[in-house]
Image (cartoon, rainbow, N blue to C red):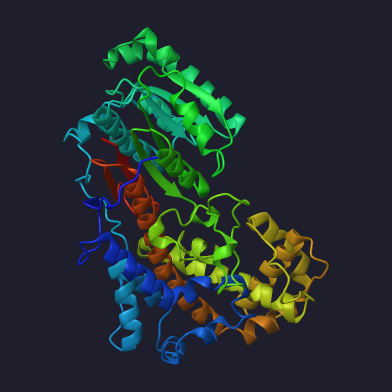
Amino acid sequence: MHSSSKLITSSVTLPEGYDSIDIYADALCRAYRDYGYLAQMHIVDFFVSGHWKQLPLEWQEYFDNEDFDIAELIDMASAATVAPGCPESLRTYVQQMFALQFPRTKTRAKPGVDISNQKQQHQTQIPKYFLGGMSPKKHAEVVELSQLINSVAVNTGCRRIADVGAGQGYLTRVLAYANSSSKAELLAIDHDWKQARGAEKYQESTLKRLKGPRARSDGFEWDDSLTSRITHDVQAIDMQTTGALGDLCKKNIDDGRFMLCGLHACGDLSSAVLKTFAESDAAAVVLVPCCYNHITENAKQTDSCADVPLNQSAPGAQPGFPLSTRFSSVFLGTNSLKAACQAAPRWEHDAEGTMESFRRNFFRALLHYLMVTDGGLSTSAKFPVVGKITATDLQRASDEAHDQFTDEFSEEDKDFAVYARAALAKLQYPWVPTVAQCARCHREMRHGLKQMAAVWALRSMVGALIESILVVDRAAYLSEHCGAGGTVGAFALFDPVTSPRNIVLVAQRK
């Protein structure tokens, strides 16, 4: 294990006004203590648990005012825009949340990483047949990240790049055959053998194309060593198997120089990759985390949060959060980690879709309320997981309820009735409400749409704060284990609108 008493912070992008990761971390913790209760709210039991009454009274009155337009929430959550009549305490909250967010605007410079200015050349040199099967979003991410990983591999002289959570191997193949000036061999690791077999088939197809006339016309120079540049391995990876992962990564390398990488490594997989770097002699790590809602915590930290749900870490295992000593006393809980997955920057780019999301969340919360008031569900029961309601589900429910539709019901009353009956049928719940019951519930709680949307918007801003805590915790952890002369970076690599989880962590040992 490598250790350093002084945190390496020069390559970690910090918000304006903060020149120390310690000062920034303190500010994040204080803000979370003040406003973390918003992230702990669960939208499903919004009405049953009375979350609205937890807001400051002047905030309630502001949002409840008939002059307040629900569409204003979109600008508030995505651009920190508040109306002139907004209470000063609410204005302060919005400004503070945005001022504390880890910078998520993509920049040209890559702090702490020596990357050439040949970015566009690298992108155009990757033929389309390397990128088959990718969405435009994945395409952009793979091209950008592969350039960064390749540069780090060259800087650190790595002989092997281990792509952890490789999935179908999109990133692996681009690193091996397109963005490959490091000439490092690739080890693609995934826990799912089906994913690994699929990646191997993609690889076979890619190799055939590289030998073909199109590749030659594109200027690709075939080398027989390419057939063995990628190795696939299936291995379960968690916080208890990091030692085995480190051993696998350096197996049969002459000088032992290897690095770890991952694109959107889910939940604790990201923590496990960073822990592997900390415990091993890996020369570098480049990681884009995601799926914060799957991060584990330790229940021993919850003395003052006994009622807060969490993803419990395995007995005796280090939890996925916190990793660093800097946040050792911070506890988040499942609902807060889910809030960190929000993508408010997207809202202003799809206002219509955001308004529809408000409506869907309102219907789901209203359904829970109806199940408790009329359907026999206990308030202490676990939330039933409805999942996606398809157009077919809705049509079937509409057909079955059609005879109950009368002119006394509004279109919104009917829409909620159809949704509720479709959801309960999907759950195979032993109760079916009448359209009249659904309409009564909808009319009784109609005011709740604006209230729930307001809390959703406020919660999304705390979610960005929580993501910042996770990023800084992981950057601090890398700094604690990078060793003298090492560098640690954390910065926005992708466009935050197309790729909400756009922060990359980079550590290089001397």
| Coordinates of residue 18 in the picture (x, y in percent) | 22, 65
Q: Is residue 51 above or below residue 211?
A: below
Residue at 70% x, 67% y is 382
Question: In the depicted view, which residue is nearer to us: 101 or 410?
Answer: 101
Residue 240 relative to residue 396: left or right: left
Judge from the rendering whether residue 276 lies leftward or rightward of residue 497; answer left or right: right
| Quadrant the N terminus occupies | top left
Nearest to the observer: residue 380 or residue 384:
380
Apparent side of residue 219 relative to residue 325 in the rendered image (left or right): left
Is residue 420 shown left or right of residue 301? Answer: right
Residue 433, percent from left and from top? 77, 74
Residue 76 placed where, x, y %? 35, 74
Residue 408 position by quadrant:
bottom right
* Residue positioned 44% across, 35% down in the render: 134
In the picture, the quarter occupied by the C terminus is top left
Name which residue lies at 38% across and 10% down: 225
